[in-house]
């Protein structure tokens, strides 16, 4: 089942981040390799996304992530 959410943060140097789910379920970890159809395989905080969720022992992981809208710019790094 597809889930909607918003990127909380994405670290370009590590290629991973966190997505908050639309209806308040636990956040999902996302890796750049889970992205589909983006030029940069990166996300930025605030990006609206749609994805599948894989529940595992360590928590929820986002798979087959699609950025919604037409954002075609590289992600910014998360502030330390």
Image (cartoon, rainbow, N blue to C red):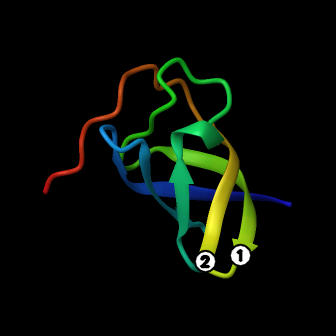
- Image-based side of 12 in relation to 39, left or right: left
Residue 46, numbered circle: none
Residue 18 place in picture, x, y as percent: 45, 60
- Closest to the observer, 26 or 30: 30
Measure how far apart labels 1 and 2 are at the Cα level. Answer: 5 Å
Residue at x-position 13% and y-position 57%: 80
Q: Label 1: which residue?
A: 56
Looking at the rendered structure, the secondary structure element under dot 1 is strand
Q: Label 2: which residue?
A: 59
Quarter of the image for residue 53 reads: bottom right
How packed is label 1: few (under 14 Cα within 10 Å), some, or many (20 or more)?
Answer: few
Quarter of the image for residue 4 reads: bottom right
- Closest to the observer, 21 or 12: 12
Looking at the rendered structure, the secondary structure element under dot 2 is strand
Q: Is residue 47 visible?
A: yes
- Image-based side of 78 in relation to 72, left or right: left
């Amino acid at each position: 089942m597809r889930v909607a959410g918003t990127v909380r943060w994405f670290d370009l140097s590590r290629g991973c981040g966190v997505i908050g789910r639309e209806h308040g379920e636990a956040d999902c970890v996302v890796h750049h390799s889970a992205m589909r159809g983006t030029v940069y395989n990166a996300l930025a905080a605030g990006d609206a996304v749609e994805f599948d969720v894989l529940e595992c022992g360590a928590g929820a992981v986002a798979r087959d992530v699609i950025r919604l809208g037409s954002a075609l710019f590289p992600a910014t790094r998360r502030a330390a």
